[in-house]
Image: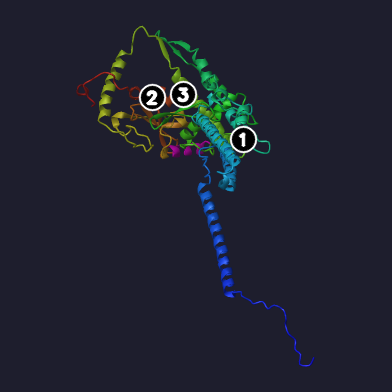
Amino acid sequence: MAGEGLFFTGTVLKNNRNLLEEEAARQKLAMQREQLELQKQEAADKRKEARKKNEYKPKNYAADGMLPFLSDNLVSKASSYRKYLDENSQEYNDDPSIRSSVVDMEGELTSYTSRAKNISSTVTTYDNLVKQGNGGTLVMADDGRYLYEYNIDKIQEATSGKDAISLEEALELYPIDAGTVINRTPYKNPINALYDAKGSKMTTITNADGSQYKALGDISKQSEDVVAGLTPDKNGNWDNPDMEKLYLGKQGTIEVDDEGSKENMSYPAAFAFETRGIDIAGSTTFTDKLDPKNPDTYDPELANEYIQFIKDKSEEKAKRNYPNQLIKAKAEDKDAEGKKAQMEYNVDTTKIISSSKTGDEANTGYQTYYGHPKLAKDLTKGIKSDSPLSAILNPSSDQAKAFKEIAQSMMAGATTMEFDVLSITLDSNGLPVALIQIPGNPNSKAFIHYSRLSSKTIEMLGDDVKQLANYEKPKVEFDPNNHSTD
Protein backbone atom coordinates (compact mmCIF):
# COMPACT_ATOMS: atom_id res chain seq x y z
CA MET A 1 0.00 0.00 0.00
CA ALA A 2 3.11 2.07 -0.13
CA GLY A 3 2.70 5.12 -2.21
CA GLU A 4 -1.00 4.92 -1.90
CA GLY A 5 -2.73 8.22 -0.97
CA LEU A 6 -6.08 9.21 0.53
CA PHE A 7 -8.59 10.66 -1.87
CA PHE A 8 -11.92 12.59 -1.17
CA THR A 9 -14.53 10.88 -3.15
CA GLY A 10 -17.60 13.03 -2.00
CA THR A 11 -19.30 15.98 -3.72
CA VAL A 12 -17.72 19.40 -3.20
CA LEU A 13 -20.24 22.24 -2.72
CA LYS A 14 -19.34 25.65 -3.90
CA ASN A 15 -20.15 28.77 -1.62
CA ASN A 16 -21.98 31.31 -3.78
CA ARG A 17 -23.14 33.78 -0.86
CA ASN A 18 -22.65 37.51 -1.37
CA LEU A 19 -21.87 38.85 2.10
CA LEU A 20 -21.96 42.50 1.06
CA GLU A 21 -25.43 42.20 -0.33
CA GLU A 22 -26.65 40.47 2.80
CA GLU A 23 -25.28 43.27 5.01
CA ALA A 24 -26.88 45.87 2.82
CA ALA A 25 -30.20 44.06 3.08
CA ARG A 26 -29.94 43.94 6.88
CA GLN A 27 -29.19 47.64 7.09
CA LYS A 28 -32.09 48.48 4.82
CA LEU A 29 -34.43 46.39 6.96
CA ALA A 30 -33.22 48.13 10.11
CA MET A 31 -33.80 51.54 8.52
CA GLN A 32 -37.29 50.51 7.49
CA ARG A 33 -38.07 49.41 11.03
CA GLU A 34 -36.72 52.68 12.49
CA GLN A 35 -38.76 54.67 9.97
CA LEU A 36 -41.86 52.72 10.95
CA GLU A 37 -41.30 53.48 14.64
CA LEU A 38 -40.89 57.17 13.85
CA GLN A 39 -44.10 57.15 11.85
CA LYS A 40 -45.90 55.40 14.69
CA GLN A 41 -44.65 57.96 17.25
CA GLU A 42 -45.55 60.85 14.97
CA ALA A 43 -49.04 59.45 14.53
CA ALA A 44 -49.37 58.99 18.30
CA ASP A 45 -48.21 62.58 18.91
CA LYS A 46 -50.74 63.90 16.41
CA ARG A 47 -53.53 61.95 18.07
CA LYS A 48 -52.44 63.26 21.48
CA GLU A 49 -52.32 66.85 20.21
CA ALA A 50 -55.73 66.44 18.61
CA ARG A 51 -57.18 65.16 21.89
CA LYS A 52 -55.56 68.04 23.75
CA LYS A 53 -57.11 70.60 21.40
CA ASN A 54 -60.49 68.99 21.80
CA GLU A 55 -60.30 68.40 25.57
CA TYR A 56 -63.14 69.95 27.66
CA LYS A 57 -62.37 73.30 29.32
CA PRO A 58 -63.76 73.81 32.88
CA LYS A 59 -66.26 76.60 33.61
CA ASN A 60 -65.65 79.29 36.23
CA TYR A 61 -67.91 79.84 39.24
CA ALA A 62 -67.44 83.15 41.12
CA ALA A 63 -68.16 83.49 44.83
CA ASP A 64 -68.27 87.31 44.87
CA GLY A 65 -70.68 88.82 47.39
CA MET A 66 -71.47 85.52 49.12
CA LEU A 67 -71.60 84.87 52.83
CA PRO A 68 -68.23 83.38 53.92
CA PHE A 69 -69.48 79.85 54.56
CA LEU A 70 -71.35 79.75 51.25
CA SER A 71 -68.27 81.04 49.46
CA ASP A 72 -66.10 78.35 51.11
CA ASN A 73 -68.56 75.63 50.08
CA LEU A 74 -68.60 76.85 46.47
CA VAL A 75 -64.79 76.94 46.32
CA SER A 76 -64.66 73.35 47.63
CA LYS A 77 -67.25 72.09 45.13
CA ALA A 78 -65.55 73.90 42.22
CA SER A 79 -62.18 72.44 43.23
CA SER A 80 -63.57 68.88 43.09
CA TYR A 81 -65.11 69.62 39.71
CA ARG A 82 -61.81 70.92 38.25
CA LYS A 83 -59.87 67.99 39.65
CA TYR A 84 -62.24 65.55 37.94
CA LEU A 85 -61.83 67.38 34.63
CA ASP A 86 -58.03 67.45 34.94
CA GLU A 87 -58.07 63.68 35.28
CA ASN A 88 -60.63 62.99 32.53
CA SER A 89 -60.71 65.95 30.15
CA GLN A 90 -58.90 64.18 27.29
CA GLU A 91 -61.39 61.34 27.33
CA TYR A 92 -64.39 63.68 27.61
CA ASN A 93 -65.36 63.41 23.93
CA ASP A 94 -64.85 59.66 23.78
CA ASP A 95 -66.48 58.54 27.02
CA PRO A 96 -70.24 59.21 27.48
CA SER A 97 -70.10 58.43 31.19
CA ILE A 98 -67.51 61.19 31.75
CA ARG A 99 -69.62 63.68 29.80
CA SER A 100 -72.67 62.76 31.89
CA SER A 101 -70.77 63.24 35.17
CA VAL A 102 -69.47 66.64 34.06
CA VAL A 103 -72.96 67.80 33.07
CA ASP A 104 -74.31 66.74 36.48
CA MET A 105 -71.49 68.53 38.35
CA GLU A 106 -71.93 71.73 36.35
CA GLY A 107 -75.67 71.71 36.89
CA GLU A 108 -75.17 71.36 40.64
CA LEU A 109 -72.56 74.16 40.70
CA THR A 110 -74.76 76.54 38.68
CA SER A 111 -77.73 75.89 40.94
CA TYR A 112 -75.64 76.27 44.11
CA THR A 113 -74.07 79.54 42.90
CA SER A 114 -77.46 81.06 42.10
CA ARG A 115 -78.98 79.94 45.39
CA ALA A 116 -76.00 81.08 47.48
CA LYS A 117 -75.94 84.55 45.88
CA ASN A 118 -79.67 84.95 46.45
CA ILE A 119 -79.32 83.97 50.12
CA SER A 120 -76.39 86.37 50.60
CA SER A 121 -78.28 89.24 48.96
CA THR A 122 -81.32 88.60 51.14
CA VAL A 123 -79.22 88.59 54.33
CA THR A 124 -77.56 91.87 53.27
CA THR A 125 -81.02 93.43 52.86
CA TYR A 126 -81.98 92.39 56.40
CA ASP A 127 -78.64 93.64 57.77
CA ASN A 128 -79.28 97.04 56.19
CA LEU A 129 -82.72 97.22 57.82
CA VAL A 130 -81.05 96.77 61.20
CA LYS A 131 -78.33 99.36 60.46
CA GLN A 132 -81.00 101.87 59.44
CA GLY A 133 -82.83 101.40 62.73
CA ASN A 134 -85.69 99.41 61.19
CA GLY A 135 -84.93 96.14 62.91
CA GLY A 136 -88.36 96.31 64.51
CA THR A 137 -89.82 94.98 61.27
CA LEU A 138 -87.94 91.69 61.75
CA VAL A 139 -89.03 88.63 63.73
CA MET A 140 -86.92 87.77 66.78
CA ALA A 141 -85.74 84.24 67.66
CA ASP A 142 -86.12 82.78 71.15
CA ASP A 143 -82.44 83.40 71.94
CA GLY A 144 -82.80 87.19 71.43
CA ARG A 145 -81.26 87.31 67.97
CA TYR A 146 -83.09 88.10 64.78
CA LEU A 147 -84.69 84.98 63.32
CA TYR A 148 -82.83 85.37 60.02
CA GLU A 149 -79.49 85.40 61.89
CA TYR A 150 -80.47 82.28 63.83
CA ASN A 151 -81.60 80.43 60.69
CA ILE A 152 -78.46 81.35 58.74
CA ASP A 153 -76.33 79.86 61.52
CA LYS A 154 -78.44 76.70 61.46
CA ILE A 155 -78.11 76.48 57.66
CA GLN A 156 -74.33 76.67 58.01
CA GLU A 157 -74.36 73.87 60.57
CA ALA A 158 -76.70 71.69 58.48
CA THR A 159 -74.65 72.01 55.27
CA SER A 160 -71.31 71.23 56.92
CA GLY A 161 -69.65 68.13 58.30
CA LYS A 162 -70.13 64.41 57.85
CA ASP A 163 -73.95 64.40 57.80
CA ALA A 164 -74.32 67.54 55.67
CA ILE A 165 -77.55 68.07 53.76
CA SER A 166 -78.07 70.10 50.59
CA LEU A 167 -78.59 73.85 50.66
CA GLU A 168 -82.15 73.40 49.36
CA GLU A 169 -82.97 70.96 52.17
CA ALA A 170 -81.47 73.33 54.77
CA LEU A 171 -83.57 76.24 53.48
CA GLU A 172 -86.71 74.17 53.87
CA LEU A 173 -85.82 73.51 57.50
CA TYR A 174 -84.61 77.05 58.25
CA PRO A 175 -86.28 79.49 55.82
CA ILE A 176 -85.19 83.14 55.53
CA ASP A 177 -87.88 84.38 53.14
CA ALA A 178 -89.70 87.63 53.94
CA GLY A 179 -92.88 85.82 54.92
CA THR A 180 -90.98 84.01 57.66
CA VAL A 181 -88.55 86.59 59.09
CA ILE A 182 -90.45 89.91 58.66
CA ASN A 183 -93.14 90.95 61.14
CA ARG A 184 -96.65 91.36 59.83
CA THR A 185 -97.45 93.76 62.70
CA PRO A 186 -95.55 97.10 62.54
CA TYR A 187 -93.19 97.78 65.44
CA LYS A 188 -94.31 100.37 67.99
CA ASN A 189 -91.67 102.27 69.93
CA PRO A 190 -92.36 101.51 73.64
CA ILE A 191 -91.04 104.92 74.73
CA ASN A 192 -93.28 106.80 72.33
CA ALA A 193 -96.20 104.71 73.60
CA LEU A 194 -95.63 105.95 77.16
CA TYR A 195 -95.74 109.62 76.20
CA ASP A 196 -98.52 109.10 73.65
CA ALA A 197 -100.71 107.68 76.42
CA LYS A 198 -100.06 110.81 78.46
CA GLY A 199 -100.67 113.05 75.44
CA SER A 200 -104.03 111.46 74.81
CA LYS A 201 -105.16 112.84 78.19
CA MET A 202 -103.85 116.40 78.07
CA THR A 203 -104.71 118.65 81.04
CA THR A 204 -107.06 121.64 80.57
CA ILE A 205 -105.79 124.80 82.25
CA THR A 206 -107.90 127.92 82.84
CA ASN A 207 -106.12 131.26 83.29
CA ALA A 208 -107.32 134.20 85.39
CA ASP A 209 -108.20 136.14 82.23
CA GLY A 210 -110.65 133.42 81.20
CA SER A 211 -108.50 131.86 78.49
CA GLN A 212 -108.12 128.10 78.41
CA TYR A 213 -105.59 125.75 76.86
CA LYS A 214 -104.61 122.11 76.95
CA ALA A 215 -101.12 121.15 78.13
CA LEU A 216 -99.15 117.92 78.28
CA GLY A 217 -98.56 118.50 81.96
CA ASP A 218 -96.13 116.67 84.22
CA ILE A 219 -94.36 113.83 82.40
CA SER A 220 -91.92 112.88 85.16
CA LYS A 221 -93.72 109.57 85.79
CA GLN A 222 -93.39 108.60 82.11
CA SER A 223 -89.70 109.57 82.16
CA GLU A 224 -89.12 107.42 85.25
CA ASP A 225 -90.73 104.50 83.41
CA VAL A 226 -88.42 105.12 80.44
CA VAL A 227 -85.30 104.99 82.63
CA ALA A 228 -86.55 101.89 84.46
CA GLY A 229 -87.40 100.12 81.20
CA LEU A 230 -84.00 100.86 79.65
CA THR A 231 -81.97 99.81 82.71
CA PRO A 232 -80.86 96.13 82.64
CA ASP A 233 -80.77 93.99 85.79
CA LYS A 234 -77.54 92.79 87.41
CA ASN A 235 -77.37 89.90 84.93
CA GLY A 236 -77.57 92.22 81.94
CA ASN A 237 -81.18 91.35 81.06
CA TRP A 238 -84.20 93.57 80.40
CA ASP A 239 -87.79 92.97 81.49
CA ASN A 240 -89.15 94.42 78.23
CA PRO A 241 -87.58 92.90 75.08
CA ASP A 242 -88.72 95.93 73.03
CA MET A 243 -86.78 98.23 75.37
CA GLU A 244 -83.75 95.95 75.01
CA LYS A 245 -83.87 96.09 71.21
CA LEU A 246 -84.24 99.86 71.29
CA TYR A 247 -81.35 100.21 73.77
CA LEU A 248 -79.06 98.03 71.62
CA GLY A 249 -80.01 99.90 68.45
CA LYS A 250 -81.78 96.97 66.83
CA GLN A 251 -84.95 98.97 66.36
CA GLY A 252 -86.29 102.48 66.78
CA THR A 253 -84.77 105.73 65.51
CA ILE A 254 -84.31 109.24 66.80
CA GLU A 255 -83.99 112.53 64.91
CA VAL A 256 -80.59 114.21 65.01
CA ASP A 257 -79.64 117.69 63.84
CA ASP A 258 -76.48 117.36 61.74
CA GLU A 259 -75.41 120.98 61.11
CA GLY A 260 -78.85 122.09 60.05
CA SER A 261 -80.03 118.89 58.31
CA LYS A 262 -82.29 116.39 60.05
CA GLU A 263 -81.28 112.73 60.05
CA ASN A 264 -82.78 109.65 61.70
CA MET A 265 -80.31 107.44 63.57
CA SER A 266 -80.50 104.46 65.88
CA TYR A 267 -80.36 105.43 69.55
CA PRO A 268 -76.70 104.34 70.09
CA ALA A 269 -75.63 106.13 66.88
CA ALA A 270 -77.44 109.33 67.91
CA PHE A 271 -75.88 109.19 71.38
CA ALA A 272 -72.36 108.75 69.98
CA PHE A 273 -72.86 111.53 67.44
CA GLU A 274 -74.45 114.14 69.71
CA THR A 275 -72.39 113.57 72.86
CA ARG A 276 -69.04 112.48 71.38
CA GLY A 277 -69.21 113.79 67.81
CA ILE A 278 -68.35 110.39 66.33
CA ASP A 279 -69.88 108.18 63.64
CA ILE A 280 -70.12 104.54 64.75
CA ALA A 281 -71.35 103.11 61.43
CA GLY A 282 -69.64 99.79 60.67
CA SER A 283 -67.99 99.53 64.11
CA THR A 284 -69.00 97.97 67.43
CA THR A 285 -66.20 99.50 69.53
CA PHE A 286 -68.50 102.14 71.02
CA THR A 287 -71.68 100.07 71.31
CA ASP A 288 -69.77 97.25 73.05
CA LYS A 289 -69.26 99.68 75.95
CA LEU A 290 -73.05 100.00 76.30
CA ASP A 291 -73.86 96.28 76.23
CA PRO A 292 -73.90 94.68 79.71
CA LYS A 293 -73.50 91.25 78.11
CA ASN A 294 -69.95 92.23 77.08
CA PRO A 295 -68.33 92.34 80.55
CA ASP A 296 -64.85 92.99 79.15
CA THR A 297 -65.90 96.27 77.53
CA TYR A 298 -69.08 97.33 79.39
CA ASP A 299 -68.89 100.85 80.89
CA PRO A 300 -71.70 101.36 83.49
CA GLU A 301 -71.17 105.13 83.72
CA LEU A 302 -71.37 105.53 79.96
CA ALA A 303 -74.47 103.31 79.92
CA ASN A 304 -76.18 105.50 82.56
CA GLU A 305 -75.33 108.61 80.57
CA TYR A 306 -76.77 106.92 77.48
CA ILE A 307 -80.06 106.13 79.28
CA GLN A 308 -80.36 109.74 80.47
CA PHE A 309 -79.70 110.90 76.90
CA ILE A 310 -82.58 108.76 75.61
CA LYS A 311 -84.85 110.09 78.35
CA ASP A 312 -83.99 113.74 77.58
CA LYS A 313 -84.48 113.25 73.85
CA SER A 314 -87.78 111.45 74.43
CA GLU A 315 -89.06 114.27 76.63
CA GLU A 316 -88.16 116.83 73.96
CA LYS A 317 -90.02 114.82 71.33
CA ALA A 318 -93.09 114.47 73.55
CA LYS A 319 -93.22 118.23 74.12
CA ARG A 320 -92.95 118.84 70.37
CA ASN A 321 -95.67 116.31 69.64
CA TYR A 322 -98.02 117.69 72.28
CA PRO A 323 -97.60 121.50 72.47
CA ASN A 324 -100.02 123.69 74.39
CA GLN A 325 -103.34 124.01 72.56
CA LEU A 326 -105.44 127.15 73.00
CA ILE A 327 -109.10 126.20 73.33
CA LYS A 328 -110.56 129.52 74.51
CA ALA A 329 -109.13 133.01 74.04
CA LYS A 330 -109.48 135.65 76.76
CA ALA A 331 -112.38 138.08 76.49
CA GLU A 332 -110.21 141.11 75.97
CA ASP A 333 -106.68 141.12 74.59
CA LYS A 334 -104.80 143.25 77.09
CA ASP A 335 -101.56 142.57 75.25
CA ALA A 336 -102.56 144.20 71.97
CA GLU A 337 -100.06 146.94 72.50
CA GLY A 338 -97.32 144.46 73.27
CA LYS A 339 -98.13 142.45 70.15
CA LYS A 340 -97.99 145.58 68.04
CA ALA A 341 -94.58 146.44 69.51
CA GLN A 342 -93.36 142.88 68.83
CA MET A 343 -94.54 143.08 65.23
CA GLU A 344 -92.69 146.36 64.68
CA TYR A 345 -89.60 144.87 66.33
CA ASN A 346 -89.81 141.85 64.01
CA VAL A 347 -89.94 144.09 60.94
CA ASP A 348 -86.98 146.18 62.06
CA THR A 349 -84.94 143.15 63.06
CA THR A 350 -85.59 141.47 59.71
CA LYS A 351 -84.16 144.53 57.98
CA ILE A 352 -81.01 144.36 60.13
CA ILE A 353 -80.59 140.64 59.44
CA SER A 354 -80.93 141.17 55.68
CA SER A 355 -77.88 143.44 55.70
CA SER A 356 -75.78 141.53 58.26
CA LYS A 357 -73.67 138.39 58.34
CA THR A 358 -73.34 135.71 61.00
CA GLY A 359 -70.05 134.94 62.69
CA ASP A 360 -68.43 133.02 65.52
CA GLU A 361 -67.26 135.84 67.74
CA ALA A 362 -67.86 133.72 70.85
CA ASN A 363 -65.61 130.94 69.46
CA THR A 364 -68.18 128.18 69.97
CA GLY A 365 -68.15 126.60 66.52
CA TYR A 366 -71.71 127.84 65.87
CA GLN A 367 -72.76 130.71 63.56
CA THR A 368 -74.87 133.50 65.17
CA TYR A 369 -75.44 137.28 65.15
CA TYR A 370 -73.80 137.56 68.57
CA GLY A 371 -71.34 140.10 67.21
CA HIS A 372 -74.11 142.54 66.16
CA PRO A 373 -75.06 144.89 69.02
CA LYS A 374 -78.71 145.15 67.91
CA LEU A 375 -79.14 141.41 67.55
CA ALA A 376 -77.75 140.31 70.92
CA LYS A 377 -78.76 141.02 74.51
CA ASP A 378 -76.12 140.55 77.20
CA LEU A 379 -77.49 139.46 80.56
CA THR A 380 -76.62 140.60 84.03
CA LYS A 381 -74.30 138.40 86.04
CA GLY A 382 -75.83 135.67 88.12
CA ILE A 383 -78.28 134.33 85.55
CA LYS A 384 -77.96 130.55 85.52
CA SER A 385 -79.78 127.59 83.99
CA ASP A 386 -79.85 123.82 84.39
CA SER A 387 -79.58 122.45 80.86
CA PRO A 388 -78.57 119.07 79.33
CA LEU A 389 -75.20 118.69 77.61
CA SER A 390 -77.03 117.12 74.69
CA ALA A 391 -78.55 120.55 73.94
CA ILE A 392 -75.22 122.02 72.80
CA LEU A 393 -75.47 123.13 69.18
CA ASN A 394 -73.10 121.82 66.48
CA PRO A 395 -71.88 119.02 68.80
CA SER A 396 -69.33 117.74 66.28
CA SER A 397 -67.28 120.97 66.37
CA ASP A 398 -63.96 120.99 68.24
CA GLN A 399 -65.23 123.74 70.55
CA ALA A 400 -68.35 121.78 71.51
CA LYS A 401 -66.32 118.63 72.17
CA ALA A 402 -63.90 120.58 74.40
CA PHE A 403 -66.83 122.17 76.24
CA LYS A 404 -68.35 118.76 77.03
CA GLU A 405 -65.01 117.31 78.14
CA ILE A 406 -64.52 120.14 80.64
CA ALA A 407 -68.09 119.80 81.92
CA GLN A 408 -67.84 116.04 82.35
CA SER A 409 -64.42 116.32 83.99
CA MET A 410 -66.01 118.55 86.62
CA MET A 411 -68.98 116.23 87.12
CA ALA A 412 -68.23 112.64 86.09
CA GLY A 413 -71.03 111.12 84.09
CA ALA A 414 -73.04 114.35 84.11
CA THR A 415 -75.72 114.78 81.48
CA THR A 416 -77.20 117.99 82.93
CA MET A 417 -75.30 120.89 84.51
CA GLU A 418 -75.89 124.40 85.83
CA PHE A 419 -74.37 126.98 83.47
CA ASP A 420 -73.93 130.74 83.48
CA VAL A 421 -76.19 132.35 80.85
CA LEU A 422 -74.30 135.26 79.26
CA SER A 423 -76.35 136.47 76.32
CA ILE A 424 -79.35 135.90 74.06
CA THR A 425 -79.00 136.30 70.27
CA LEU A 426 -80.24 134.83 66.97
CA ASP A 427 -78.60 132.11 64.89
CA SER A 428 -78.31 131.91 61.10
CA ASN A 429 -81.87 130.56 60.90
CA GLY A 430 -83.28 133.49 62.88
CA LEU A 431 -83.92 131.28 65.93
CA PRO A 432 -83.18 132.55 69.45
CA VAL A 433 -80.15 130.96 71.11
CA ALA A 434 -78.45 131.40 74.47
CA LEU A 435 -74.70 131.73 75.05
CA ILE A 436 -73.74 129.66 78.09
CA GLN A 437 -70.51 129.26 79.99
CA ILE A 438 -69.18 126.70 82.46
CA PRO A 439 -68.93 128.49 85.83
CA GLY A 440 -65.36 129.60 86.51
CA ASN A 441 -64.21 128.77 82.96
CA PRO A 442 -64.44 131.95 80.85
CA ASN A 443 -62.96 130.17 77.80
CA SER A 444 -65.56 127.40 77.78
CA LYS A 445 -68.62 128.71 75.96
CA ALA A 446 -71.34 127.12 73.84
CA PHE A 447 -74.74 127.93 72.37
CA ILE A 448 -78.03 126.17 73.09
CA HIS A 449 -81.51 126.92 71.82
CA TYR A 450 -83.36 129.48 73.95
CA SER A 451 -86.09 126.91 74.57
CA ARG A 452 -83.56 124.65 76.34
CA LEU A 453 -83.14 127.16 79.18
CA SER A 454 -85.00 126.27 82.36
CA SER A 455 -88.41 127.88 82.81
CA LYS A 456 -87.16 129.64 85.96
CA THR A 457 -84.34 131.23 83.99
CA ILE A 458 -86.67 132.48 81.26
CA GLU A 459 -88.94 134.06 83.88
CA MET A 460 -85.99 136.12 85.16
CA LEU A 461 -85.25 137.72 81.79
CA GLY A 462 -86.30 141.28 80.95
CA ASP A 463 -88.90 142.30 78.38
CA ASP A 464 -86.23 143.47 75.90
CA VAL A 465 -84.61 140.03 76.01
CA LYS A 466 -87.97 138.29 75.59
CA GLN A 467 -88.73 140.54 72.63
CA LEU A 468 -85.57 139.26 70.94
CA ALA A 469 -86.39 135.70 71.96
CA ASN A 470 -89.90 136.05 70.47
CA TYR A 471 -88.62 137.29 67.12
CA GLU A 472 -90.32 135.83 64.06
CA LYS A 473 -89.76 136.80 60.47
CA PRO A 474 -92.84 138.77 59.30
CA LYS A 475 -95.13 136.85 56.99
CA VAL A 476 -96.41 139.95 55.18
CA GLU A 477 -94.78 142.24 52.66
CA PHE A 478 -93.36 145.43 54.11
CA ASP A 479 -91.35 148.46 53.09
CA PRO A 480 -88.15 148.42 55.16
CA ASN A 481 -87.62 152.11 54.40
CA ASN A 482 -90.63 152.93 56.56
CA HIS A 483 -89.02 151.41 59.67
CA SER A 484 -86.14 152.88 61.55
CA THR A 485 -83.46 150.74 63.15
CA ASP A 486 -82.02 153.57 65.22
Q: Residue at x 63, y 27 (%)?
A: 173
Q: Is residue 401 magenta?
A: yes
Dot in front, 3 or 2: 3
Q: Position of residue 341 (x, y in %)?
A: 29, 18
Give SS at disc 1.
helix
Judged by its main secondary structure, the magenta piece is helix
Query: Contact, CB < 8 Å: mark 1 with mark 3?
Result: no
Dot in front, 1 or 3: 1
Q: Residue at x 57, y 25 (%)?
A: 181
Left or right, 440 with respect to 115, comes to: left
Residue designated by label 1: 156
| Amino acid tagged 3 | Glu
Residue designated by label 3: 316
Q: Residue at x 46, y 20 (%)?
A: 319
Q: Residues within 10 Å of mark 2 (few under 14, many from 20)?
A: some
- Which region is colored magenta? 400-412
Looking at the rendered image, the quarter that the C terminus falls into is top left
Residue designated by label 2: 461
| Amino acid tagged 1 | Gln
| Amino acid tagged 2 | Leu
Mark 1 → mark 2, Cα distance in angstroms: 66 Å
